[in-house]
Image (cartoon, rainbow, N blue to C red):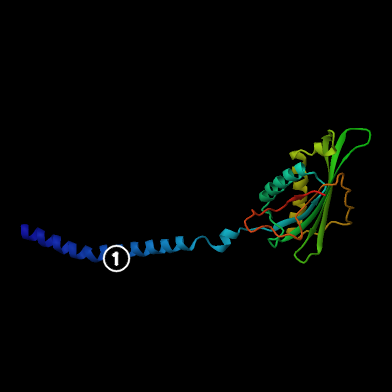
Amino acid sequence: MRDLTLSSAKTAAGHNGPARHLRWLVLGALAMLAAGCTAQGPSPTASQGFGPTVAFDSVDGPPPQVFQRLVRVLEAEGATRNISVVSRDANPSYRVRSYYAAQVERGSRRASISWVWDVYDVDQSRAMRLSGTEPAGAAGRDAWDAADDAVLRKISQAGLVGLATLVNGGTPASPAPPVPEASGPAVAALPGDSAPAADAAPQALAFSGQ
């Protein structure tokens, strides 16, 4: 009886040996495959993302403090619409030259912000002009004091919606409205002739006073 049990155990071990060896081979192959995927990193498609890109070549009109808030609002609103605001050196899908003017209604203290976006395609041809006037509430000592984040957000949303229409095959609006006159000497733009330093953080927009 003891010999039979021992013989049966040896027989079972002999049958299970190849199967166990095969399992180890499969597990080893899977481990090597996983290591290879990790070493290669994410695919180019995953790292590059999707959607059109837009660079603001110039933002004329707002003073520095308004300009900085406008940059943040544009980037945030663009992200919600899968439109990335990038540096002008990044070969964007579209380029925008934008103009802003703050004015106070005569006989009152109610301010408004007029804006125009000239949108250019990769061939440097103007594809669309977008424009509007956004009420901005009561003005302070300066009309730009009324341009709070809510006003800048509405302007940015309107411009990006129009840009999305162009991206999706919409027709440009016509006729083109005139560019509003700036209410101050400040001009926000990226320097055209100077290249950024190699260790400088990339930025989509920058302010330069005149």
Foreground: 185 or 57? Answer: 185
Classify residue 163 by image quadrant: bottom right
Task: Identify which amino acid the numbered label 1 is placed on.
Answer: Leu
Residue 1 shows in the view:
no
**In the depicted structure, whether residue 199 falls above or below residue 111:** below
In the picture, measured across the screen, residue 107 lies left or right of residue 144, that is right
Q: Residue furthest right?
A: 107
What x and y, as percent, mark residue 3?
Answer: 6, 60
Foreground: 76 or 174? Answer: 76
What x and y, as percent, mark residue 112?
Answer: 85, 40
In the picture, measured across the screen, residue 107 lies left or right of residue 171, that is right
Classify residue 110 by image quadrant: top right
Residue 73 shows in the view:
yes
What x and y, as percent, mark residue 66?
Answer: 77, 42
Foreground: 73 or 80? Answer: 73
What x and y, as percent, mark residue 180?
Answer: 88, 49
**Residue at position x 43%, y 64% in the image:** 36
In the picture, measured across the screen, residue 49 lies left or right of residue 74, that is left
In the picture, measured across the screen, residue 76 lies left or right of residue 63, that is left
User: Can you say which quadrant of the picture contains the N terminus?
Assistant: bottom left
Question: Circle 1 — which element?
Answer: helix
**Residue at position x 82%, y 35% in the image:** 137
Q: Mark 1 Cα within 10 Å, few/some/many (few <14, many 20+)?
A: few
**In the depicted structure, whether residue 172 falls above or below residue 150:** below
**Residue at position x 69%, y 49% in the image:** 75
How many badges with numbers are in the image?
A: 1
Residue hosting label 1:
22
